[in-house]
């Protein structure tokens, strides 16, 4: 009996060892989020710690936050070239290379982060429609995803009383869908990465922002804001972390498995935290002096009508450029239906 028990223990030990990566691996990962940002804390770092745990410490990371390795718009190319192994990519910052990925930023029928995230993950993960149409042709594969809660308009000085309040305002956008949405309300879109917004507000080159609640505090823009909309959907923003296919192919099968499984777990964990924080941070912003305004019913209905055509317009424009806009929009909508 003792002989068989020892043999069983030896077999379990062997299986545990065989489930670990064959060699130690340190991966360089970079993003543009300021230290302490909720996405970095609750998705990126959560993932890294999970990967370390699953690998028994054989997979480790060198983490470069806050644009230490490059501007937000450059992180895709830095990942493709191998300067980074894994990089944060906001598709709107590189819309020339990832125009289809803006589908997750449309003011579609989702009201929280997890609904949008689950749908986007379904089409962007390896083998999904968006992966095949866009990420794979760019030589990268998605590891992590977050679609943020719906964006609101925040203004520095102008009081919000209705749709006419937005006319002529210079509003920070991420481009893509929110640029079209900004034009729809008579405002002037200014495409800008989030880390640049504070300086632009302080200089007066922006009159306001399209931002989610939970990005107001980490980018320290609250002191420059007075009014904001509530209970409307001006679209969202897509966060992805990608690894180059070339680097992926260099990893052993067990390392690939750990990165992928931990990535899906961190994606779901991250959106759950984002949804919990959304209401909490809105209250903190209100306590900090921002007045949240509900648009009059007639204006809200008009806004929904204006934005309701945005997704189809976006898809039509991409189709005219030879991109499968309608196909990807249809895939995202199908995935949203399943997620809900």
Image: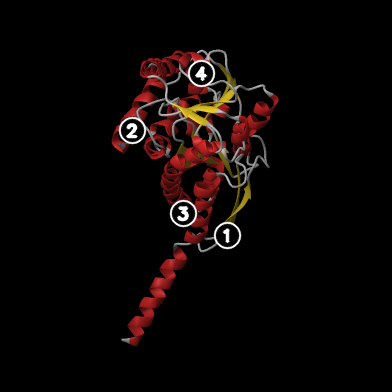
Are the residues tagged 3 and 4 within 8 Å (C-beta)?
A: no
Separation of disc 3 and disc 4 at Cα?
41 Å
Question: x, y (%) of residue 50?
Answer: 48, 56
Separation of disc 2 and disc 1 at Cα?
39 Å
Q: Nearer the viewer, mark 1 or mark 4?
A: 4
Are the residues tagged 2 and 3 within 8 Å (C-beta)?
A: no
Q: Nearer the viewer, mark 3 or mark 1?
A: 3
Residue found at the far right of this picture: 203
Q: Quadrant of residue 87?
A: top right
Q: Earlier in the sequence, mark 1 or mark 4?
A: 1
The residue to which callout 4 is attached is 182
Q: Earlier in the sequence, mark 2 or mark 4?
A: 4
Are the residues tagged 1 and 4 within 8 Å (C-beta)?
A: no
Q: Earlier in the sequence, mark 2 or mark 3?
A: 3
Q: Secondary structure at mark 4?
A: helix
Question: x, y (%) of residue 113?
Answer: 42, 38
Front-lying residue, 284 or 266: 284
Q: Which mark is residue 258?
A: 3
Q: Quadrant of residue 37?
A: top right
The residue to which callout 1 is attached is 24
Q: Secondary structure at mark 2?
A: helix
Q: Earlier in the sequence, mark 3 or mark 1?
A: 1
Residue 98 in sight in this render: no
Q: Secondary structure at mark 1?
A: loop
């Amino acid at each position: 009996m003792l002989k068989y028990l020892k043999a069983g223990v030896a077999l379990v030990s062997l299986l545990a060892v065989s489930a670990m990566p064959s060699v130690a691996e340190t991966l360089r990962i970079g993003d543009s989020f300021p230290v302490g940002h909720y996405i970095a804390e609750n998705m990126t770092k959560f993932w890294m710690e999970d990967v370390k745990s699953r690998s028994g410490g054989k997979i480790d990371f060198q983490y470069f936050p806050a644009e230490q390795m490059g501007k937000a718009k450059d992180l895709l190319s830095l990942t493709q070239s191998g300067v980074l192994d894994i990089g944060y990519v906001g598709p709107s910052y590189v819309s020339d290379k990832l125009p289809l990925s803006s589908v997750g930023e449309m003011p579609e029928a989702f009201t929280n982060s997890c609904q949008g995230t689950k749908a986007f993950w379904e089409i962007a993960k390896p083998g999904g429609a968006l992966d095949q149409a866009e990420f794979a042709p760019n030589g990268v594969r998605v590891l992590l995803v977050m679609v943020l809660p719906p964006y609101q308009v925040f203004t520095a000085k102008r009081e919000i009383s209705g749709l006419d309040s937005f006319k002529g305002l210079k509003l920070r956008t991420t481009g893509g869908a929110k640029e079209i949405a900004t034009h729809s309300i008579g405002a002037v879109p200014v495409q800008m990465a989030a880390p640049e917004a504070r300086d632009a507000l302080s200089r007066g080159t922006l009159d306001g922002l399209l931002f989610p609640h939970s990005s107001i505090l980490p980018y320290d823009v609250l002191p420059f804001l007075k009014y904001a909309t509530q209970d409307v959907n001006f679209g969202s923003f897509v966060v992805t972390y990608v690894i180059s296919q070339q680097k992926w192919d260099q990893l052993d099968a067990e390392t690939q498995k750990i990165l992928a499984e931990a990535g899906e777990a961190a994606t779901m964990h991250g959106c759950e935290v984002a949804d919990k924080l959304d209401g909490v941070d809105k209250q903190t912003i209100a306590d900090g002096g921002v007045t949240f305004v509900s648009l009059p019913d007639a204006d809200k209905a008009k806004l929904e009508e204006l934005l309701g055509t945005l997704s189809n317009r976006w898809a039509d424009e991409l189709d005219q450029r030879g991109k499968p806009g309608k196909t990807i929009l249809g895939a995202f909508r199908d995935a949203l239906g399943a997620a809900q």
